[in-house]
Amino acid sequence: MTDTLPGTAPRSPRPRRRPALLLLLLLAVCSAVAALGGVAASDAASTYRSLDRPAWAPPSWLFGPVWTVLYATIAVSAWLVLRRWSLAQARAELSLWCLQLALNLIWTPLFFGAGWYGLAFLDICLLLAALGGTQLLFRRRSPAAALLLVPHALWVLYAAALNLAIWQLND
């Protein structure tokens, strides 16, 4: 006899890990992505200020604090999944989680480093798709993990609209 509901994945015993260490590792991964993005676009603030932007564009100083909070929630969301499920059990979820982090990282050098606003827009659209898929898969494992990604999805949706507007204004 199992204690799972019909149509749900069987639940195995909680993996034997140190949850705090796992959280620190995930926070370090997200911090590394943020740092690499910062290195790839060290002059991002001045580049952003030099662009023609729509009236609803945020000031450049806002991006740092917003992304700091978002990367923390991205890490915690994965932690909520991995503290109950092994890597093998959550392979699909973590693969999409890694993909959305990679697409997030790639966007910065495309947009700020190369000035390829159209390619950056394609990347951010793929990021939205990967993020939506991550949320759907995370929801099966931890509804709280999926909810933690909502602010990220909303910000990326806003950023996609901003990317498109900047592309149109600066083409």
Image: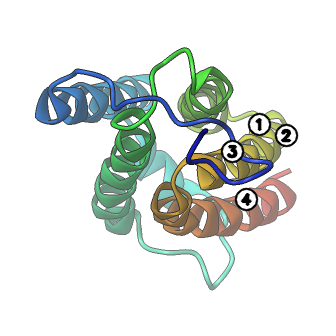
**Residue beneath disc 1:** 123
Q: Secondary structure at mark 2?
A: helix
**Amino acid type of the residue that numbered disc 3 sits on in the rendered structure:** Leu
Q: Residue at x 31, y 59 (%)?
A: 69
Quarter holding residue 25: top left
Q: Mark 3 or mark 4: which comes first in sequence?
A: 3
Q: Secondary structure at mark 3?
A: helix
How was the colour assigned to the protein in this rendering?
Answer: rainbow
Q: Given contact means CB atoms under 8 Å apart, are the residues at marks 1 and 2 in contact?
A: yes
* Alpha carbon distance from label 3 to label 1: 21 Å
Q: Position of residue 2 (x, y in %)?
A: 59, 40
For residue 160, which numbered disc appears in the image? 4
The one nearer the camera, 102 or 38, is: 102
Q: Position of residue 52 (x, y in %)?
A: 67, 65
Q: Given contact means CB atoms under 8 Å apart, are the residues at marks 1 and 4 in contact?
A: no
- CA neighbours of label 1 inside 10 A, class few (<14), some (14 to 19), many (20+): many
Q: Residue at x 28, y 62 (%)?
A: 65
* Alpha carbon distance from label 1 to label 2: 4 Å
Q: Mark 3 or mark 1: which comes first in sequence?
A: 1
- CA neighbours of label 4 inside 10 A, class few (<14), some (14 to 19), many (20+): many
Q: Position of residue 5 (x, y in %)?
A: 68, 54
Q: Residue at x 42, y 72 (%)?
A: 59
**Residue beneath disc 3:** 137
The one nearer the camera, 161 or 103, is: 103
The one nearer the camera, 98 or 35, is: 98
Can see residue 11? yes
* Alpha carbon distance from label 1 to label 4: 9 Å
Quarter holding residue 157: bottom right
Q: Mark 2 or mark 3: which comes first in sequence?
A: 2
**Residue beneath disc 2:** 122
Q: Secondary structure at mark 1?
A: helix
